[in-house]
Amino acid sequence: MADASRPTPDVPLVAAEDLGVVFQGSQGQITALDTLSLNIRKGEFVSVVGPSGCGKSTLIRVFSGLLAPTRGRALLKGEPITRPRGDVGIVFQQANLLPWKTVLDNVLVPSRALGRDIGPAREKALELLRLVGLEKFRDNYPSELSGGMQQRVGIARGLAHDPDLLLMDEPFSALDTMTRDHMSIELQRIWMATHKTALFITHSITEAVFLSDRIVVMSARPGRIVKEVSIDLPRPRTVETLADPRFAAYCAELRALFEELVHFD
Ligand SMILES: Nc1ncnc2c1ncn2[C@@H]1O[C@H](COP(=O)(O)OP(=O)(O)O)[C@@H](O)[C@H]1O
Ligand SMILES: [Mg+2]
């Protein structure tokens, strides 16, 4: 018998079909995305890299159901995404924790907003706090945590309602370099433990190569996909991966591509 919880192999979990977004700015129309098509398989970790202003956050907003595209469709499990949904989780650039709520209550915010049963949601939240290494801080307030710890709470919150798709918009860009490297390793561990499908936006080529199964490179505005690079490196990737010549070769390939894009401007 077919397992109904599993999408058929030829239906991608996430898809963008000819997606276009045009904003009405004060100086006229701005085409943020231009006929962008993308498929993401269940369980895949895909990163999007591209110059500033190329429409990366716009793409995340469309997938989160917060912004309707001007043309084309965004699909999750074959259904158009038309509003925020319980099967999508989001991690933002800033952790955006509520300062008057404890760590545990911050993680529970989406579950409460979705009207989930709070008993099981609490269990799940505590399990995630264990996973991100912050179980001991469950009753602390955000101001008592470092930036990296706050962002780990943000990741736990993004996963708390057990979404199928985790969207992350430059989640580590506000952190210092040392913390970022550590967070990449942490995120890979969390992703491997939860088997989520992930769409990750970053400015950092090394971060994208370290984390991804596939990297999508976007051109400057209007945002189009100019290249997709599959990263064939064994997992789990570790600090040793950073010294692997194949890792360096992927980074060099992507950097060269970026140089071309900038000259194109
Ligand atoms: N609400 C909006 N109104 C008008 N222009 C916008 C709006 N949101 C984004 N833009 C413009 O769309 C383009 C893409 O923005 P964004 O998706 O934030 O880029 P990125 O995240 O890649 O830096 C930019 O030129 C930005 O100024
Ligand atoms: Mg952005």
Image (tube, rainbow, N blue to C red):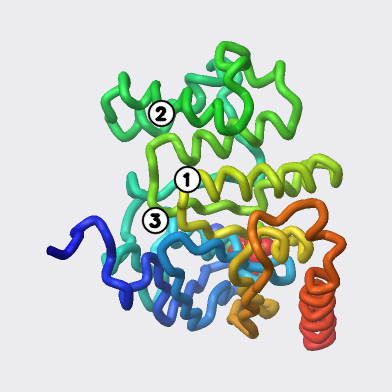
Residue occupied by mark 3: 65
Percent position of residue 77, x then y: 30, 64
Q: Residue furthest left?
A: 1
Instruction: Give the number of the mark in front: 3 or 1.
Output: 1
Quadrant showing the N terminus = bottom left
Q: Is 7 positioned to the left or the right of 15 in the image? A: left
Going from the N terminus, do you reach mark 2 or mark 3 first? 3
Residue occupied by mark 2: 124
> Residue flagged by tag 1: what amino acid is it?
Thr
Q: Is residue 135 above or below residue 77?
A: above
Residue occupied by mark 1: 194
Mark 3 secondary-structure assignment: loop
Regarding residue 252, the answer to whether it shows in the image is yes
Q: Is residue 135 above or below residue 28?
A: above
Q: Residue furthest top?
A: 139
Going from the N terminus, do you reach mark 1 or mark 2 first? 2
Q: Is residue 198 above or below residue 55?
A: above
Going from the N terminus, do you reach mark 3 or mark 1 first? 3
Residue 207 falls in which quadrant of the image? bottom right
